[in-house]
Amino acid sequence: MTVRSIFFKRHTLWLPTIWFLVMLLLVLSLTLLLGFRGIACFLAQTSPNHGEYLVVEGWQGEQGLQQALLVFNDPKNNYKYLITTGGPNTQWGGEVWPNYADKSANYFVSHGLVAEKLVSIPTPASAQNRTYLSAVMVRDWFAQQSINVNELDVFTQGVHARRTRFLYELALPASSIGVYANEPEGYQLPIWWKNSQGAKTVLTEVIGFIWTVCFFEPGTVGSHQERWGRY
């Protein structure tokens, strides 16, 4: 027995060949490509609870608002109240309707919704995430009305749905949050990359969703940071 055999053993080590590495790279690339193509459908989540309250983000276009009204009036649903949200109106009609909550509320009333079933909750200007602040305003309204809401559904625009649900869950942790994603205008979710509008909208939302999940800090309940945020 030699000194070498006392301290060392010979083992056979299997290493992947160059062809195995190429195949592995191709499989991973294909998987990532297919997953990325399906990212729009992932973000445009629709998973409602069918409770009594339907919150509609009022900054959507008329097509989105009309889809929300159809959902609210669907006899299969049990919604009793439609809540509109939205911050300062930066588009047309700003002098008449200074915020999107009131502007969308007017749309619903003018299209047959009974005013007694409608609640408008405007969101003030803020440096904070606007969707999150809208959720905070909804939470505070329920508290002011002494309403303990267990289930709440939010209707929003396409690929913004998953981020919207995440933010509402942050603002209303005691409530089960459902979500609807409307059908986007100008592109189709399964083939979003085939035109510039779809590509711009989806890629922007991908970045926004990742940033929100990883870095967004809402602040403690009732704090200045929660209402206004940080620059």
Image: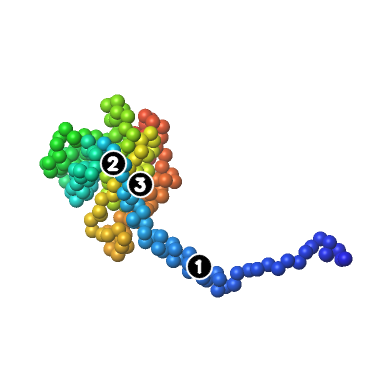
**Near-viewer residue (78 or 132):** 78
Give the residue number, with chain letter if any, for mark 1. 25
Q: Position of residue 179 (x, y in %)?
A: 31, 45
Mark on residue 107? Answer: none
Give the residue number, with chain letter if any, for mark 2. 50
Give the residue number, with chain letter if any, for mark 3. 163
Q: Are marks 2 and 3 in contact (CB under 8 Å)?
A: no
Mark 3 Cα shell of 10 Å, populated few (<14), some (14-19), many (≥20): many
Location of residue 150 (image quadrant): top left
Q: Position of residue 66 (x, y in %)?
A: 18, 48
Label 1: which secondary element: helix
Q: CA distance from mark 2 to mark 3?
A: 19 Å
Give the mark nearer the N terminus: 2 vs 3: 2
Residue that lies at the very extreme toward the right in this rendered image: 1
Label 3: which secondary element: helix
Label 2: which secondary element: loop
**Near-viewer residue (95 or 80):** 80
Q: Amino acid at mark 2?
A: His
Mark 2 Cα shell of 10 Å, populated few (<14), some (14-19), many (≥20): some
